[in-house]
């Protein structure tokens, strides 16, 4: 990049001014035309998530999340063991009968429980970031991904999602931002959709209505 910069023949002041123009453009984005997003954001997000093959449950508070996750795993006849984000380790998982550990994920962990930066109502997409308390692998390696989504984190579209990320981190975004729209899938095998191709076979979202 230094050679490219030198080849442009810019002096130090020109480089500084160009960097400032980029900084201003990023801090003051001008969104393009968008289709209207009508109706309640939570309802839209749930409907979009279900279209992407995620299952959804709604609870009233964060304290209700462990019991809701345990009930869904029991109903689905899935393992109750796995890992949870350090950011969510304070919930009473053990009291709900779940053996979820706050540690780095292993390839044989059946369940990974995460939160998210935000959730996009338009597409049913979860936006997650890689950080010490929110490791990406928790949502990628286990066959079952459970995501906890407070309604205050549901935004209309991608533009608002990036605005929320910039408000949290400014220009120093985490090194990885992941967008999750339902279970992993591919259509490469005889043009048939196959779930769990490159990640979780299933995604379950617990929406927390308490703001």
Image (tube, helix red, strand yellow):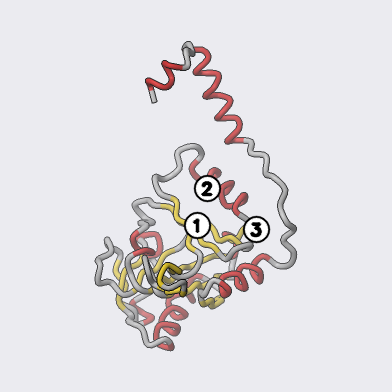
Position of 120 compared to 82: left or right?
A: right
Quadrant that contains the C terminus: bottom right
Q: Which residue is mark 2?
A: 165
| Residue closest to the eye, 123 or 208 | 123
Q: CA distance from mark 2 to mark 3?
A: 14 Å
From the viewer's perspective, is 49 left or right of 1?
A: right
Please tell me how crowded label 2 is: few (under 14), some (14-19), or many (20+) other residues with Cα within 10 Å. Answer: many
Residue 64: x and y, percent?
49, 76
2 or 1: tag closer to the N-terminus: 1
Residue 197: which quarter of the image?
Answer: bottom left
Identity of the residue drawn at 74% across and 64% down: 38
Find out whether the residues at labels 2 and 1 contact each other: C-beta distance under 8 Å.
Answer: yes
Q: Residue at x 40, y 71 (%)?
A: 189
Disc marking residue 127: 1
Horizontal and vertical percent for residue 117?
50, 56
Q: Quadrant of the N terminus?
A: top left
Residue 105: give x, y in percent of width and height: 28, 64
Q: Can you identify the residue that label 3 sits on? A: 156
């Amino acid at each position: 990049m230094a050679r490219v910069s030198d080849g442009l023949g810019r002096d130090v002041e020109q480089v500084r001014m160009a960097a400032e123009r980029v900084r201003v453009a990023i801090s003051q984005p001008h969104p393009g035309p968008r289709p209207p997003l009508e109706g309640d954001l939570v309802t839209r997000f749930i409907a979009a998530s279900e279209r992407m093959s995620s299952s959804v449950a709604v609870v009233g508070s964060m304290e209700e999340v462990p019991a809701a996750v345990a009930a869904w795993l029991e109903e689905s006849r899935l393992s109750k063991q796995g890992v949870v984000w350090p950011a969510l380790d304070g919930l009473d998982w053990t009291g709900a009968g779940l053996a979820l550990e706050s540690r780095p994920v292993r390839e044989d962990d059946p369940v990974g429980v995460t939160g998210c930066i935000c959730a996009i109502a338009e597409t049913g997409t979860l936006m997650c970031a890689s950080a010490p308390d929110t490791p990406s692998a928790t949502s990628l390696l286990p066959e079952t991904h459970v995501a906890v989504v407070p309604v205050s984190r549901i935004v209309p579209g991608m533009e608002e999602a990036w605005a929320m990320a910039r408000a949290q981190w400014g220009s120093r975004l985490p090194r990885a931002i992941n967008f999750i729209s339902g279970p992993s899938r591919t259509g490469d095998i005889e043009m048939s959709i196959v779930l769990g191709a490159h990640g979780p076979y299933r995604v379950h979202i617990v929406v927390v209505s308490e703001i």
